[in-house]
Image (cartoon, rainbow, N blue to C red):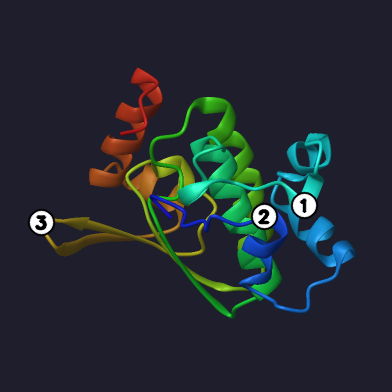
Amino acid sequence: MQDAHLFHESIAENLRYAKQDATQDEMQSACEAAQIWDLVKSLPNGFETMVGERGHRLSGGEKQRLAIARLLLKSPSIVILDEATAHLDSENEQLVHAALSNALKGRTSIVIAHRLSTVREAVQILVLDKGVIVEQGKHDELIARGGLYSELYNRQDLTGTTN
């Protein structure tokens, strides 16, 4: 999701790529869970608002959350995310985290992340170094071990950076 792909169509049409027969209520529920409903309802044309070519009328976080709403409408059993919170400011990152928390419940998810806050709640974390798995476990276990994950997590936490 480094760059959520949106089409030069309305918000509704972008959502209906996931489920062609989605009702207004289904789209609203998906948008609420994806933390984007407040924006949609504030727009003069609501769901009929055009997002522009590649969603240029929306911020990076808004695009991500709209893509998460689309994911919720599709309801896949497996989700793969690549740097879902990359290039977001802290406010949008928090909203995307909340949206992902809703979107990933009950699904098998593979999350590729450099921002370790993204994977903190994961059931299993694999830590790669130069293409080799060097650690695996839950967040708390990896922190307690004091290995590479712990070092990277603490560095991000102390500096306030997430890269």
Quarter of the figure with residue 75: bottom right
Relative vertical location of residue 108 with respect to residue 163 in this rendering, above or below: below
Image disc number at residue 10: 2
Tell me the SS state at disc 2. loop
Q: Amino acid at mark 1?
A: Phe
N-term-proximal mark, 2 vs 1: 2
Q: Where is residue 136 shown, x and y percent of the image?
A: 33, 62
| 118 to the left or right of 152 | right
Q: Residue at x 65, y 48 (%)?
A: 50
Secondary structure beneath label 3: loop
**Between 1 and 134, the one nearer to me in the picture:** 1
Closer to us: 146 or 91: 91
User: Which residue is labeled 1 in the image?
Assistant: 47
Q: Position of residue 147 (x, y in %)?
A: 25, 45
Q: Are marks 2 and 1 in contact (CB under 8 Å)?
A: yes
The residue singled out by tag 3 in the image is: 130
Q: Position of residue 16 (x, y in %)?
A: 68, 70
Q: Amino acid at mark 3?
A: Lys
Q: Nearer the viewer, residue 126 or 107?
A: 107
**Residue at x 58% of width, y 27% of height:** 91
